[in-house]
Image (tube, coloured by chain):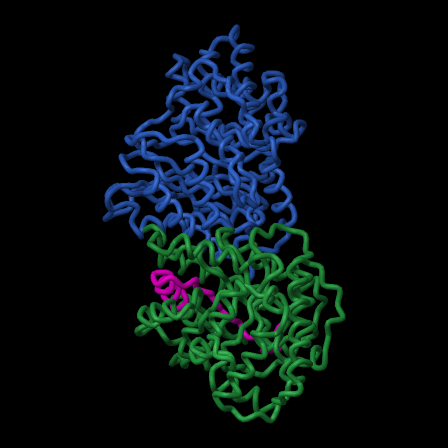
Chain colours: A blue, B green
Amino acid sequence: MSCYKGKYADELIANATYIGTPGKGILAADESTGTIGKRLSSINVENSESNRRALRELLFCTPGALQYISGIILFEETLYQKTAAGKPFVEVMKENKVLPGIKVDKGTVELAGTNGETTTTGLDGLAQRCAQYYEAGARFAKWRAVLKISANEPSQLSINENANGLARYAIICQENGLVPIVEPEILVDGPHDINKCADVTERVLAACYKALNDHHVLLEGTLLKPNMVTPGSDSKKVAPEVVAEYTVRALQRTMPPAVPAVVFLSGGQSEEEATVNLNAMNQYKGKKPWSLTFSFGRALQQSTLKAWAGKEENVKKAQEAFLARCKANSEATLGKYQGGAAGEGATESLHVKDYKY
Amino acid sequence: MSCYKGKYADELISNATYIGTPGKGILAADESTGTIGKRLSSINVENSESNRRTLRELLFCTPGALQYISGIILFEETLYQKTAAGKPFVEVMKENKVLPGIKVDKGTVELAGTNGETTTTGLDGLGQRCAQYYEAGARFAKWRAVLKISANEPSQLAINENANGLARYAIICQENGLVPIVEPEILVDGPHDINKCADVTERVLAACYKALNDHHVLLEGTLLKPNMVTPGSDSKKVAPEVVAEYTVRALQRTMPPAVPAVVFLSGGQSEEEATINLNAMNQYKGNKPWSLTFSFGRALQQSTLKAWAGKEENVKKAQEAFLARCKANSEATLGKYQGGAAGDGATESLHVKDYKY
């Protein structure tokens, strides 16, 4: 009946807490080979291992950026890659007090009898993979469950199945020394309003925390990566203060204080929107016994990618764009972002309908 | 899918919050006729309506006591009783900013196929009864679910059934303007250690909060009345700081911050023990985004009862004992209790095996 108290317990708690350090957050750089291919092709760059390596080096070695980053989520390939000078990326991170993380799920498959709802796969052999990743330097993991909102969705089956999968993944990670990021993403797609998003988010999070309790997960050694509570993509936008209020309230109603931090996903939000919303959350006055920080992929890299365009001569400019976004989000975790870090593309919506990656 | 947002929502939130006001707590004076009979007989007093009325007047009209009390839980008979001078008790409370509460359950019955485990009854006609009680001045309610710890208990059935009953009771209360106190008491009986109590408490509370979410209960308009996390009654006692640590941790792992306050039951603890443990909890350094206060019955009345012994000439002395305990517990909610409020009987254990009332 008790939660995980094994050999990694103290380390899990320390690492999860560190990731939520005020002023720091996560860079989600775990795009699979297929997904990063789409990003590269959008700037006319070939999807080669060398280019993938070059892009990640550009990000991880941006002077001054890593002080704002507590963890980087990697795709498996990247965990074993090095800088051009031959230094393993995990070394670069270690030297800069950044925890390496690893995406461990194997993507989604459809649930029969539902209207296109999915569950996430990857439990088979997960323990062994986690142990190997720990050996390679990883200290946290990520697993993305996906739900959607429409007239009859998410179904009870989808909620139960995804919550259970997240809980199984979480305890297996902990047994192998990795802090599990629990990510139940509710897609922003749809014409629904913010109330509907709030209701679904609260229901999904309640199911997740019941499942985590059932599976004996040590909450102090986990992180939550939820969507912010917003109107649907086909619905009118609301002010950041409203997003903040609804999001914090949803968390207050479902997330036990034992969880040290929330690392928000950016979904389809533009770089600037994601930062401004995160900032509003940290300014919001109300009970918030957990850190509220970021785990952004597209919302940290979009401008950088555009500035780089695959060209060596653009690296410095691209790194400046990346540094600006890291600093902006760092300030947002402290409620101190003043705006104005927008570079080219920073206000561009990054929404892709029914996003799969 | 959304939680209760009906006509009483704002009132429920403000009443629940008020009950958790630092420095205040609840007097549980809802002993049924049978149970109060046992108390009265222990001091050789006849169990007549007049004596029951006299005892309650002694308590509610103790000069200076009600400033420490935010709510009093009543048995139905008492809700309609008056002082000797003819003033309704609910008037006395209103004048002193004390919210009247009402016990609404109808006791426990055994669950077939279990080893003496129970569920709580009282859902039939509960809506109408709550509406009547609201009319009579009640603003909160209480329903006691009971679980026990042993080799095979609590069973999943007992946990599910009691959590579900609490959630049904809670939403019905809210629909009728009463703040529901959710009380899943895990009896202290047994030789188990504090770790076992913690594990069971966490499992039970997780089930309760999942059920409350399923039943669309507005958490901001509820209170929790749990047992403190302690060793079993047949096991070695531990220091108050340990009780504090284990109890707060169990709450951190299961109780969403939206709930404004925890109003601990005293179980079989002596008056002094209950106060000291509550004090230790309020001194404990950690995430505590809810008030931690008291809802004590025996642990507020024991010394008072002994001092009164049913005699008019003892009323003043009895009221002094009651005032001392109220003040002591008020200080404990602020972490400022220095000890020394012990009167005759204050350190006497109030444990009765397999307590039913």
User: In this view of the protein, can residue A76 be seen by the observer?
Assistant: no
Pick out the residue farthest to the front.
B85
**How far across and how far down the image is residue A78, in percent?**
52, 27
Residue most extreme to the top? A313
Is residue A33 rendered to the left or right of residue B40? left
Q: B322 or A239: nearer the eye?
A: B322
The x, y position of residue B51, in whole percent, is 53, 88
Residue drawn at x 35%, y 46% is: A199
**Between B96 and A321, which is closer to the camera in this rendering?**
B96
Q: Residue at x 73, y 75 (%)?
A: B342
What residue lies at 53% left-to-right and 58% top-to-bottom?
A: B261
Give the quarter of the image for residue B277: bottom right
Q: Position of residue A117 (x, y in %)?
A: 29, 43
- Which quarter of the figure is the C terminus of chain A placed in? top left
Q: Residue at x 42, y 70 (%)?
A: B162
User: Left or right: A13 with respect to B87?
Assistant: right
Q: Residue A182 at what x, y percent from top left?
A: 47, 43
Q: Is B306 rendered above or below residue B29?
A: below
Which stretch appears magenta? Answer: B165-193
Foreground residue among A348 and A211: A348
Q: Eyeballing the image, is B85 above or below A265? A: below
Front residue of A163 and B275: B275
Asked whether, in this view, residue B198 is left or right of residue A77, the answer is right
Whether B184 is among the magenta residues is yes
Figure label count: 0
Using the rendered image of the protein, determine whether residue B282 is visible from the camera's viewpoint.
yes
* On screen, residue A310 above or below A301: above
Q: Is residue A153 above or below residue A235?
A: below
Does the stretch in magenta take in A16?
Answer: no
